[in-house]
Image (cartoon, coloured by chain):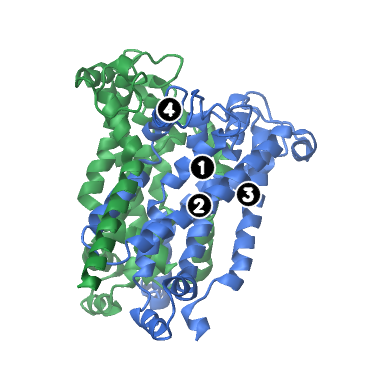
Amino acid sequence: MTEKMLTRQRTRLSPKLKEGLTGYLFILPWLVGLLIFTIYPILSSLYYSMTDYNLLTEANFVGLKNYMDIFTKDARFLKSVKVTLTYTFFQVPLKLGFALFIAMLFKGNRRGVNVYRSLYYLPSIFGGSIAIAIMWRQIFGRTGAVNAILKSLGLITTAKSWIASPDTALGTLILLAIWQFGSPMLIFLAGLRQIPQSYYEAASIDGARAWRKFLHITLPSLSPIIFFNLLMQTISSFMSFTQSYIVTGGGPTDETLMYALYIYDTGFTNYRMGYASALSWISLIIIGIITMVIFKTSNYWVFYESKAE
Amino acid sequence: MKVKTSRKITTVSFHMFIILLGIVMLYPIIWMVASSLKPADEVFRNAASLIPSKLMWQNYVEGWKGFGNVSFATFFKNSFVVTILAVIGQVISSAVVAYGFARIRFPGRKILFAAMILTMLLPAQILLIPQYIMFVGFDWIDTYLPLIIPHYFGTPFFIFLIMQFIQGIPRELDESANIDGCGKFRTFIQIIIPMTLPAIATTTVFSFYWKWDDFMGPLLYLHSPMKYTVSIALKSFSDPSSVTNWSAMFAMSTLSLIPSFVIFLCFQRYLVEGISTTGLKS
């Protein structure tokens, strides 16, 4: 009798508990994946960063030696941080500025805008591919199309390799990144179309010029979207690998040694897994700081509709 | 009258400007396609030109032969297998998790959701080394498993995208299904999935792009040329010290872009909407 009651009770879970369990059942794949493919690797990398692990022999615990070496003896580390920061500092604002400029052009519903929008998005579709990186390398090489065009216009007399000269190598990578402005452009465009037309009409009545409307209406209204784009582009800029690996190979003399490329080199060319793990952890901290700075400063320049009113 | 002509001038100059800028922007892509059709010795001798002196379709046949006795038929097949299996996993698992987060109340939901957003900001390179060591431990090196299996656990970016979409569906639909005796699973499959198709299409398209272009994964995990995907094959094929036929090289590069291009043509609308909504709603 009591047994029967117990089983009945067990099958009739309270609806709240049942809903809770169902919820966990649905998010289970992500939860399991988080543990296996994110949390465990991050923690194990913290351990490896304090060892001399090289894949072949047992890992020996070396304490903070890797970190000390990175900060005191490693010139390539400093170089790669400098290169990555320079790359990000130019690439992200230029890309976002260009994306916003094009979005402003496409804002009105002129005829043909939809076709143009797709054409301008095309480089972003192909941009991440190896084919494009190889093409970029050849176009900016000594015998490439860029030199041929500049020569025929009489702008240069001797051909130089843009990817092998220390003063232009990073520039070609920055240009490749700006060229893929498609996603921020589309996000800006959608944002622009949400700004109420009445704002602009009111400003026109007050006699505001186009430039002032842009400064005082468009930019503040777009600021949450600019913030989002800035954050995402900065983080992905820090992870940029394929472009420098293929186009310049990090050269000449480490002028384009991106941080991710340096980690790859340390881990998979020299098999210094412990040292590379320490480098990864430092990059996590650097990106964490940058993300925090972006978030903190956003209080001063990001305007949300509800706050303003 | 005057206003009309000046408006006409703005319109004409607008189109002129956009088209000129567009040509500059698309030039590199056109250059690559043109180079794939030029005679091999012409690619860099006449580098600026976009018009081949004669059309060498032969380059595609040459390139297709590949290298080391492995043809591009194999590389393309490998790429399709890896991409399709990864995309299927990514779409299904992300949709399931998105439904859990968007529609079911369970304790700890807010904290877990915040954790998921945080992982979106996590730079992938931190995982590079430890994941590699882990997959060496699993004995997964030189197999497709590291390129496919991790996608079966939901991807935060896509979970977020689909969630946004589910939250736009009126809750009354779920509730009336519930009254009709539908459990959460049936509601998910019969009500939510059909209504989320646009978001699922967007996810599929992005997932396809990223996987098709993926280079780091194959670079780390695939060692035998028989297993190469197109991206890693192109890299080996283009090694400056070994390339003799650049036209054939560009022919294969051009081919490698075609799947993405076809999908772009078919799904343009979803793509534009998808990008716009993810950017706007966060």
Amino acid carrying label 3: it is: Leu
Q: Do the residues at discs 1 and 3 belong to one chain?
A: yes
Chain B drawn colour: green
Residue for point 41% across, 51% down = A181
Image coordinates of residue A225 in percent, x first then y, are 46, 66
In primary-sequence order, the first of circles 2 and 3 is 2
In front: label 4 or label 2: 4
Disc sitting over residue A94 in the figure:
2
Nearest to the observer: residue B80 or residue B38: B38
- Chain letter of mark 2 equals A
Q: Secondary structure at mark 2?
A: helix
Image coordinates of residue B125 in percent, x first then y, are 56, 42
Snapshot quadrant of residue A125: top left
Disc sitting over residue A151 in the figure:
4
Amino acid carrying label 4: it is: Lys
Amino acid carrying label 1: it is: Ile
**Do the residues bearing badges 4 and 2 touch, measured as CB atoms within 8 Å?**
no
Q: Secondary structure at mark 3?
A: helix
Nearest to the observer: residue B39 or residue A203: A203
Look at mark 1 in the image and give the residue it sits on: A174
- Chain letter of mark 4 equals A
Chain A drawn colour: blue
- Chain letter of mark 3 equals A
**Do the residues bearing badges 2 and 1 touch, measured as CB atoms within 8 Å?**
yes
**Do the residues bearing badges 4 and 1 touch, measured as CB atoms within 8 Å?**
no
Q: Note whether residue A16 is visible.
A: yes
Label 3 crowding class (10 Å Cα cut-off): few <14, some 14-19, many 20+? some
Spatial CA span between label 2 and label 1: 9 Å
